[in-house]
Each structure stands twice: as structure tokens, then as C-alpha cells.
Amino acid sequence: MVKYVYSFLEGNKDMKDLLGGKGANLAEMTSLGLPVPPGFTITTDACKEYLKRGEVPETLTTEVTQALRDVEREIGRRLGDPDKPLLVSVRSGAKFSMPGMMETVLNIGLNDESVQGLARMAGNDRFAWDSYRRLIQMFGKTVMDVDGDLFANALDQMKADRGTTQDTDLTADDLKELTETFKVIYRDATGEDFPQDPREQMDKATEAVFRSWNTERAAIYRRRERIPNNLGTAVNICTMVFGNMGEESGTGVAFTRDPSTGKSGVYGDFLMNAQGEDVVAGIRNTLALADLERINKPVYDELLGIMRTLETHYQDLCDIEYTIEEGKLWMLQTRVGKRTAAAAFRVATQLVDEKLITSDQAVERVTGEQLTQLMFPQFDTDSTKTLLTKGMAASPGAAVGGIAFNNEQAEAAKAQGRPCILVRRETNPDDLAGMVVAEGVLTARGGKTSHAAVVARGMGKTCVCGAEALEIDLEAGTLTVGGKVLKEGDTIAIDGSTGEVFDGDVPVSDSPVTTYLLKGLEAGLAACNGDEDMTELVTSVDRILTYCDKSAKLRVRANADNPTDAQRAVDFGASGIGLCRTEHMFLGARRPLVERAILSEAGSQERVEALAELGKLQRQDFKEMLQVLDGKPMTVRLIDPPLHEFLPDLTSLEVKVALQHERGEHNADDEKMLAAVRKLHEANPMLGLRGVRLGVWMPGLFAMQMHALVGAAAELKAAGGDPRPEIMVPLVGSNAELAIIRREAEEIIAEELEAAGVELDVPVGCMVELPRAAMIAESLAEEADFFSYGTNDLTQTTWGFSRDDCEGVFFPHYIEAGIFGVSPFESLDVHGVGRIVEEGVRRGRSAKPDMKMGVCGEHGGDPDSIHFFASVGIDYVSCSPFRVPVARLEVGRVEA
Ligand code: PEP
Ligand code: MG
């Protein structure tokens, strides 16, 4: 029988698939002997079963009864008991944290009778009625979909009637009356009474949590974070402890280190006499954790001790949620904390220095994506800026854009290609859509652990929060700060590393991390201008990358087709060029030459001359690039695209010629061009005359390129250089095709080397970008010195998806429908295309065990894909120069 319920005494931190992150960590803390209120977790399997069947599995109900009775026995109180009621919280908790995306219901177990018992137990009528009205409100809203404003308005009305604006001014009797009003709202909206049976409350809340997995905002969040749709959420049922029992009680969140800089210390926000979400909601302004020392020293000391225990146990930065109930500390949650990219690097090296983790573990703590974020530009330190105000530096980066006050405005700006900053008083999960499209997020309220801050950090988005001087008037559509009034669309700039908010546009400059990556450690440190945090960061990145380079299982090359990109690739640490797309050298002023070559008769003098001209230019290009790469391999791919790409568009040309005819004119050049374009026109050009087929079909074309490359290399070699050219043939599907080009190549290589009087090994290999090539790899290997998997075309030809058309058209629907979580052109489809790569590697190596194999499709720079390529024995990945540092980091993270 499937087990659906685990007591906190049973699970552990490694059971996140089944118990979700929160449940697994509550169990871990329980087994560490930390003060966790008793409770149990309903598994993600139960959620999946519920979502599949639309009803709760029967055995779940009975298991819950057992687990609940165990909790009741442990705590000595029963759910719904009129004298000493046990109250529980029902909280969602998926494998991956999805802050605020799913439901929570607190104070389950209160009804018309047990509220009296709670009042007597707590010696506090007001507290009991406040808890009861909160239950009806939360249960109504989240479980029964009652419009939350109905409750909020009734509360406001009561405060207005009593002449106050503070909840705390309402008396026990007021709250009792409010509870009755809430019950009426509940009945009117749902057609039934608020359930008095506590078990019914608990079961319905559990189902609501299950259902919340499929809400739209949760789905958006998962898409954004690439969290699979089929994981489901666990449900944690936990004994309630109260942070709102008076001034001896409170609740808070804390980090064992600063989540934005990584600095070790005491970081967190708390509120006395507050419950649950009050701290993260950003509604009341919080106190800093350090203030707790003054307010309750024993609890503060205990909390710090627990934080140290957790950091030692998890060997990482942890975040925690706790509640103090009448002076007693309770731990409600912990997890390895989200952090900014900068903090990730700093914390990783700090923990190595503190001898808590090994260098291997440190490399696991950072990702290529985080390194990408650190490469983002920053505001120019020298530029003149108009400071509007300063808030908290919640998530680093420099963002500039027009003000958007809500999701609609942000999405409209995005649709028109205008960058925007989402400006809110505070954010909640409903603002997610706006946060996704905005360049940055600015809030007027809330601390570093507010929703805006946590979510923005998770997204790697710039965020400034708690900028209290901002007055936002949504009705008027204005943002007022220090007497200045700004409207929707007005440009502001926010600095997520300092918390500054500027009026107007502010120029941005390179981050010191980028300077380091391009110019080395000394230059990177100099660019920090003495800023200690930045200096520590650059040093951390250097230490980790150096370690990665040393332990790398794969090499990283770059895709580049001009000397500037080649230089950048080398500066970023590429070990060579894995793909030089030579057709990129045929553009601009060279186009007429290409046209001439294409339009001339095969074997004609004109063609010979046009190709010779092109050859001269290519030779110079190759020479410059080989000089940049001196000593490093450079794979040059012979021309790949269909030739019509170099000629005018068929339709426009037809119209042009037809108009000439109408006017009785005849232009011989245009007519000749039209005939050629018609001749080369193809219905499916990507499946047509391109790649190796061109080389076979149009003698002289590949030969010109090979002469240029080998000639340039021979010249450099003769001059004492160390050129390492490699010739690569695209779109090969048969070894006979490759054999034809190879023979030609061998003759040209011999001829050029002999002419220059040098010796040079020039490998000839091919791309594997058709499924057939992979399936006959053992025989292709006879003709190829190396393979490079062109996973762009391989994805196109395996799925039959046009890489130029599908992504913008129906992929969003496919992602929505869960057919795939991410475009297969972005991250390799390991189950389909990946298997073909794997089969190609296996077959190729069966013929030539030491054959070098690389990947040069876009996937070569994608972290997940890199890990897959390593697992099937690929030797190197080649990606765009800007992705090289990311790929260097990722190849260092590949497990041994
Ligand atoms: C590929 O197909 O993966 C590839 C690298 O070639 P291109 O993108 O130029 O077709
Ligand atoms: Mg290709």
C-alpha cells in the first residue's frame, strides 16, 4: 500500500521529492532535536493522485487520522476540543520553493465552541476571536474562493465605525461581532455555513492546497523557473504556535548570512505580536533581528545557536522562519536559502575557507546562470545622476525603464519593446506577471525578506524594496517622491546593489566581473575601485573558475567568425574555436562577388575569377583569426546555407521585373538574376541544396575556401606561427558525400603545404546534424577525423520543427500544454535528440575509439545540455563568446 503520510519524526531532508522542501526540512529539524511543533506531511504522491482522480484517496483519510491522533497524544490536546483545542496550520510545500504561489490556511480547529476554549487557554478573549475571524477569512478566501475584499471591507467598516485605523484597537467584542459578520459573508457567498467540524476544515484545506498546484500564478512561476508541472505539492499539517499572543510573542524570518552579499552575521526581520505572513507581506515595517537581543535575550541567544547548528548541518546558508509564543521559540521552517548570484560565489568560497565544505562542493554551489547575472553591466560611477530616494538593496543589478504601476502596464510596455520598472507599494503573488516582464522591481514597503525581494532574487532581477519616501497613488497614476511627481512611462533607474533610485536614464558600464573575465584578475580587481564586497566577489569568481578549469572534463570552445569575436572568445578563456561559420564572411560588401560567382556559368572564366577574388578575402580573414588563436584549434566550417540566401528575394524581384515589363522596359541584369533566383528557389530550403550538397554540386566553391584556409595557415606556419586549422563539412548524411570532399581536401592541403614548404596536420571532419549521420557514424568515422554535433539542425531534423518558424508561433502553446518545459532549441531534448547524439558517439567511437567529438549547436552554452553532453562522452562544447565563462563554470561542475 502506498504510504501517503509521514510524521515529522519519520522523514529527512533528502526526501524532498515525496515530502516537498518544507516537509523534508521540518523532519530534518525534528531529528536534529530542534523545537519544531509536532506535525506530519501528506506526500506529493497524494497530491498527484488527487489531481488525477479529482478525489482524495481513501487510505489518505485513514492515515491522516492516525497521524493526527499521534500529534494529539504528543501535545495533549485534541482538534476541536471545546476546552483545550489543538489548532493546526495547513501549508503547501513543493519540492522546489515557490514563494507565495500556493495556499496556506492557519488556525484550523476553531469553531463556535473551541474558540471559547482557546480564549480560556490563552487567557485572552481578544486573541481567540481574532484567530477565529482570521480562520473564516482565510478559509473562505483560499478554500471556497470567496472574494477576499468582502472580508477586508467588513474589517475596514468596523474600524471606521469604531473611529480607528488600527486592527489592534478592536476589542474582543468587536472581533466577536466581526466573526459573525464574516460567517454571514461566507454563507452568502458559498450557500453553506462555515464548517464547524474541524476535521472537515482540515480536509477541505488540504484539498485546496492540492488544487493550488494548478493555479495560473503557480503555473507561470513554474514555467519561469523551469519547474516540471507534474511534481505536485506536499501538504504540511503542523501544530499552531502563536506569534500574536501578546508582546511576549512574535514571528520572524532570518538568514544565517546576508542573502545579498553573503556576509556572515545576523540577518533577518521580525515583528512582535504578529502572525504568519505579516512579516513577509511587507504590510507592517519590521524590526531587524539584532533588535531581538534587546527585547528577549534568551530567545535571541537560542535562535543564534540554532542558526549555527543549521548552517553547520546543512553546510550552507540557511533561511528560517520562527515564532516566539509567549517567550518560547519554535522553528517553523528552514531551507538552504535563496541568494543573489554574488552571494552564491562569496558564500561558496567563505565556506571553503571556514573548512565547512570542500572545493568540489563549492563548485556545486554556484551555477552558470549566476555567473551570467554577475556579468550584467552596472551604473557608470562617473555619470551624473539625480537621486530620487534610497530603499533597500534587495537584488543586485542596474535596471532602467519606464514606470509601470501594474501587470497590465508592464506587459503593454514589454509588448511595445519598452523596458519598464514595476513600481508597487508592495508586491504579492498576483504581481508575478509584471515582475517577469519588468527590468526591475521597486517597492515602497517591505524588507529584504518581503515578497518582492525574495521573488526578484530568485529571478535574478534587479530589485529595490522598502523605499519609504515613495508615495504611490494608483488612482491618479502617479509616483510622488520628494515633491517630484512621476507618471506611468517616465524613466527611472534603480540600483539593486545600493538601493538607490534615480530620476531619468543612467548610463551603465561593465561589471568588474566582466572586466576580470576579459582582462584577468589584476584588471578585475582594479575595476573594483576599492569596493570590498566587489573585490571579494571577483576573487571568489576567480578561485572558482580556476578550480573549474583545472577539474574540467570537457573543453570549451567558441563559435566565432571574425577576429574581434575570436579575440573576445580567447579573452573569455575559450580553448579554441569550435565553429567558424564561413558564410558570415560573405556578407556586406562581398555580396556582389558572391552573386557573381553564383550567377556565372559553371566552369566559366567569370566564375573562376569571382571565386578567386573571394578566396583572397577569405584567406586574409582566416589569417587574422588564426593569428588570434595561435596555438589553439580553429574549426572552419565550409559554406552551409542555401545559395539563394545570397540573392535577392524572389517575390520582390518578380514584382520589380513585372513592373519593368509593364513599362515596356527590359533590364538584362535583373532578368538574369530573376532566372537564377527561380532556378535556385526551393520549397524547403533548409532541407535542400545546402551544406555538403553544395560542395558536391558546385565545384570550386569548397575548394576556394579550403585553399584560403590552408594557404593562410601554411603562410603563418612558415613565419613561425602555430596555426591549428580544422576543416569541417556541414550537413553530411553519407560517407560517400564526405569521401568526395575529403579527397578534394587532401589534395588541396598537400598542394598548399608543399608550396609553402611546411608540414602541418589539418584534420578534416564533419558535422553530425542529421539523424542519418548519427546512425551511420561508424562508417562516417572512416572518412572523418572528428565529429561536431550540430544540435540546432539535429533538433530541427529529428523533431521536424523548423528552427526559423516554430519558436515564436506554437512553442508557447506547447509549453503551456506541458508537451515540453522549455524549447528544445534552447535546452537539448535529451530523450530524443540526446539519444541520437549518444548513439552517434557510441557508433563513431566503435570505429575510432579516440575520435574527438564536440558540440557546436546553441546547446553548447546551455548548462543542462552541457551536463548531458559530458555524460555521453563529448570532448568539447562550442558556444557564443559571451557564454564561454558560463560554459567553463558548468564543465567544471560536471560530476566526475
Ligand atoms: C547546428 O546546426 O547546430 C549548427 C551549429 O549549424 P548552424 O546553426 O549554422 O546550422
Ligand atoms: Mg547546422
Image (spheres, rainbow, N blue to C red):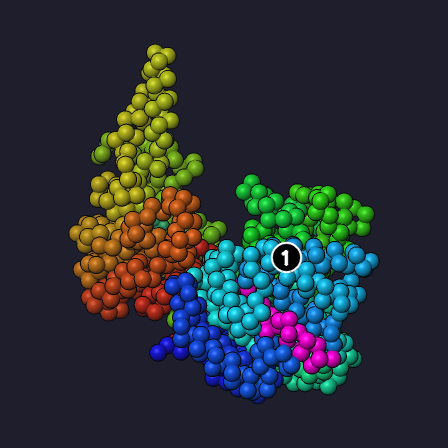
350 up-or-down from 92: above or below = below
Q: Nearer the viewer, residue 884 or 759?
A: 884
Residue 875 seen in the current view = no
Q: Quadrant of the N terminus?
A: bottom left
Q: Is residue 120 magenta?
A: yes
Q: Residue furthest top?
A: 664
Would you identify the image quadrant in which residue 293 lies?
A: bottom right
Q: Amino acid at mark 1?
A: Ile
- What residue is shown with label 1? 185
20 up-or-down from 707: above or below = below
First to last magenta residue range? 102-123
Q: Quadrant of the C terminus?
A: bottom left
Q: Residue at position x 28%, y 56% from top?
A: 768
Q: Residue at position x 72%, y 82% from top?
A: 327
Disc 1 crowd, CA 10 A, few/some/many (<14, 14-19, 20+): many
The location of residue 216, given as percent across then percent down, is: 50, 55
Q: Secondary structure at mark 1?
A: helix
The location of residue 569, given as percent across then percent down, is: 47, 57
Q: Establish whether ligand 1 lies closer than 8 Å to the Cβ of label 1.
A: no
Q: Residue at position x 59%, y 72% from top?
A: 108
Q: Nearer the viewer, residue 516 or 323?
A: 323
Apparent side of residue 107 relative to residue 22 in the rendered image (left or right):
right
Total marks in image: 1
The location of residue 258, given as percent across then percent down, is: 65, 72
Q: Is residue 400 magenta?
A: no
Q: Nearer the viewer, residue 329 or 558?
A: 329
Q: Residue at position x 58%, y 62% from top?
A: 193
Q: Nearer the viewer, residue 496 or 190?
A: 190
Residue 831 seen in the current view = yes
The location of residue 816, given as percent across then percent down, is: 43, 52
664 up-or-down from 341: above or below = above
